Image: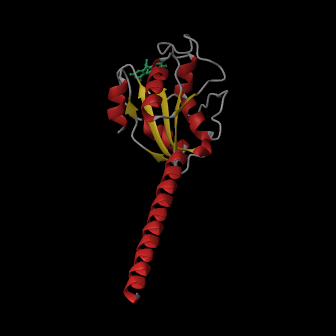
C-alpha cells in the first residue's frame, strides 16, 4: 500500500511538472508572437515621375510593409524637373542644401514602426531635399532606417552623408539601389 501511494504521488508530481513546463512554453511563444506582431515596417517614398513609386510598391510587397507616398505640397512639373535648366525648381532646391520643400501629408502614428524604408530618385547624386523635410518631421531615434533609390545610372553617391544629419539618432543602413529590380531581386537585396 505504501509503495502504491509513493508511485501515485510521484506520478502526480511528474504530471504537474509537465503541465507547468508546457504552460511556460506557451507563454513564451505568445510573448514572442506579440513582440513580432508589434514590429512594423513602413515603406515611405517620394517619386516625381513614377519609377521609385513602382520600386516602392514591389518592396512593400516583399517586406510586408505599409506603403506611404511623400506628397509635395506643390507637385513637381516637367519644367521643375529640368536639370538642364540651372534656374528650374529642382536645380535651385538641390543647389541650396538647406532648402526644405513642404510636404502636404503625414505618416499616421510613426511610433508603431521600428523599420522605415525611405525611397527617392537620385537628384544630383543625392536624395532630393524634400526627403530631408520628411526625415526631419519625425522622431526616428532608435529606428532602423533603410534608404532605397532609383536613378538614371549613378549610384548612391553622397546620399547618406546628406540624410544622416536630418536624423542623427536613427540606425541608418546603406542605401539600396532598386533601379530596374524585379521582386525576386529585391527579395535577395533586402535579406
Ligand atoms: C532633377 C533631376 C536630377 C537627377 N539627377 C540624377 C543623377 O544625379 N544621377 C542619375 O543617375 N540620375 C539622375 N536623375 C534621374 C532620376 O534619378 C531617375 O530618372 C529616377 O529613376 C526617377 O525616379 P522617379 O520617377 O521616382 O522620380 C535625375 C532626375 C532629375 C529630375
Residue 125 visible in rendering: no
Counting every numbered tag in the picture gives 0
Q: Is 11 left, or right, of 93 in this rendering?
A: left
Residue 139: image location, x then y, percent: 60, 46
Look at the picture and state if 187 lies above or below 34. above
Question: Quadrant where the C terminus lies?
Answer: top left
Nearest the eye: 130 or 12: 12
Furthest residue toward bottom: 2
Q: Is 103 left, or right, of 95 in this rendering?
A: right
Residue 179 visible in rendering: yes
Furthest residue toward front: 1
Nearest the eye: 137 or 113: 113
Residue 55: image location, x then y, percent: 44, 24
Query: Quadrant for ligand 1?
Result: top left
Colour scheme employed for the rendering of this structure:
secondary structure
- Residue shown at the point (58%, 27%) measured from the top left: 70
- Residue shown at the point (54%, 20%) measured from the top left: 90
Residue 18 sits in which quadrant? bottom left
- Residue shown at the point (44%, 80%) measured from the top left: 9
Q: Is 191 left, or right, of 116 in this rendering?
A: left
Residue 168: image location, x then y, percent: 52, 48
Residue 73: image location, x then y, percent: 66, 23
Look at the picture and state if 75 lies above or below 40. above
Question: Quadrant where the N terminus lies?
Answer: bottom left
Nearest the eye: 43 or 90: 43
Amino acid at each position: 500500500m505504501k509503495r502504491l501511494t509513493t508511485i501515485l504521488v510521484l506520478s502526480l508530481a511528474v504530471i504537474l511538472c509537465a503541465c507547468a513546463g508546457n504552460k511556460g512554453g506557451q507563454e513564451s511563444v505568445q510573448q514572442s508572437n506579440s513582440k513580432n506582431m508589434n514590429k512594423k515596417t513602413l515603406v515611405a517614398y517620394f517619386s516625381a515621375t513614377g519609377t521609385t513609386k513602382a520600386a516602392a510598391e514591389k518592396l512593400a510587397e516583399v517586406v510586408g510593409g505599409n506603403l506611404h507616398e511623400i506628397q509635395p505640397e506643390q507637385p513637381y512639373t516637367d519644367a521643375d524637373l529640368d536639370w538642364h535648366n540651372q534656374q528650374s525648381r529642382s536645380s535651385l532646391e538641390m543647389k541650396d542644401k538647406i532648402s526644405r520643400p513642404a510636404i502636404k501629408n503625414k505618416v499616421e502614428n510613426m511610433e508603431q514602426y521600428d523599420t522605415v524604408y525611405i525611397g527617392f530618385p537620385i537628384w544630383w547624386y543625392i536624395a532630393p531635399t524634400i526627403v530631408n523635410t520628411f526625415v526631419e518631421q519625425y522622431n526616428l531615434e532608435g529606428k532602423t532606417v533603410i534608404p532605397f533609390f532609383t536613378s538614371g545610372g549613378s549610384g548612391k553617391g553622397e546620399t547618406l552623408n546628406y540624410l544622416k544629419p536630418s536624423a542623427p539618432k536613427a540606425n541608418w543602413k546603406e542605401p539600396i539601389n532598386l533601379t530596374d529590380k524585379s521582386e525576386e531581386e529585391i527579395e535577395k537585396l533586402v535579406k
